[in-house]
Image (cartoon, rainbow, N blue to C red):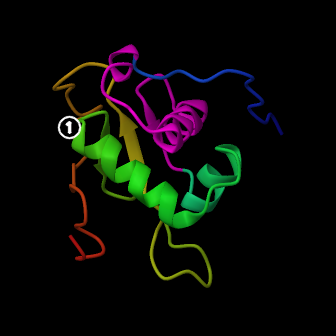
């Protein structure tokens, strides 16, 4: 089995003037580590927090919300089966390398922030 063991992260350069907090930078770098060439990734918040230096789930969630508000992140409709024992399918994200970047394909749906939790 070929496991991706990249030692680098691809993040949008336009994030430099937009991001002010350190945790948000670390979360962006963690997402960039898992992102495909189209910017799509689907790590869970625990994995993001561990790769971002051991930050907790609440700080990861705050950072993801800040990235979404700065239009550096898009939340896509989850795909595939739900993991056994889990409440719902995992989140899928798209890093936006360009402002107003189109969806990666016509089969993708942008669900927006809070659409799954109905908290915001």
Can you identify the residue that label 1 sits on? Answer: 106
Whether residue 74 is visible, yes or no, is no
x and y, in percent, of residue 23 in the image: 52, 44
Q: How many marks?
A: 1
Q: Which residues are magenta?
A: 13-42
Does dot 1 land on a helix, a strand or a loop? loop
Residue with the most extreme top position: 13
- 115 is higher (above) or lower (below) than 14: below
Rendered image quadrant of residue 55: bottom right
- Specify whether residue 118 is painted magenta: no
Magenta stretch holds residue 28? yes
Quarter of the picture holding the C terminus: bottom left
Q: Is residue 51 left or right of residue 71?
A: right
Q: Is residue 12 visible?
A: yes
Q: Residue at x 50, y 68 (%)?
A: 81
Q: Is residue 27 above or below residue 60?
A: above
Residue 45 found in image quarter: bottom right
Side (left or right) of 46 relative to 10: right
The location of residue 90, given as percent across then percent down, is 48, 63
- Residue 118 percent location from the top left of the image: 22, 76
Which residue is found at the position 20% from the left and 22% from the top? 99
Position of residue 99 in the picture relative to residue 89 (left or right): left
At a point 78% along the width and 36% down the height, the residue shown is 3
Residue situated furthest right in the rendering: 1
Name the one closer to the observer, 48 or 86. 48
Q: Tell me the quarter of the image containing the N terminus.
A: top right
- Nearer the observer, 106 or 86: 86
Describe residue 99's horizontal placement relative to residue 117 as left or right.
left
Q: Residues within 10 Å of mark 1 (few under 14, many from 20)?
A: few
């Amino acid at each position: 089995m070929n496991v991706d063991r990249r030692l680098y992260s691809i993040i949008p350069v336009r994030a430099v003037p937009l991001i002010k907090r350190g945790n948000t930078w670390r979360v962006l770098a963690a997402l960039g580590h898992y992102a495909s060439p189209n910017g799509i990734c689907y790590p869970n918040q625990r994995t993001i927090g561990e790769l971002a230096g051991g930050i907790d789930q609440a700080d990861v969630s705050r950072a993801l919300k800040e990235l979404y508000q700065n239009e550096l992140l898009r939340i896509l409709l989850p795909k595939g089966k739900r993991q056994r024992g889990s409440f719902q399918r995992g989140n899928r994200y798209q890093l936006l390398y360009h402002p107003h970047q189109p969806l990666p394909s016509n089969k993708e749906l942008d669900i927006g922030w809070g659409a799954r939790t109905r908290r915001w």
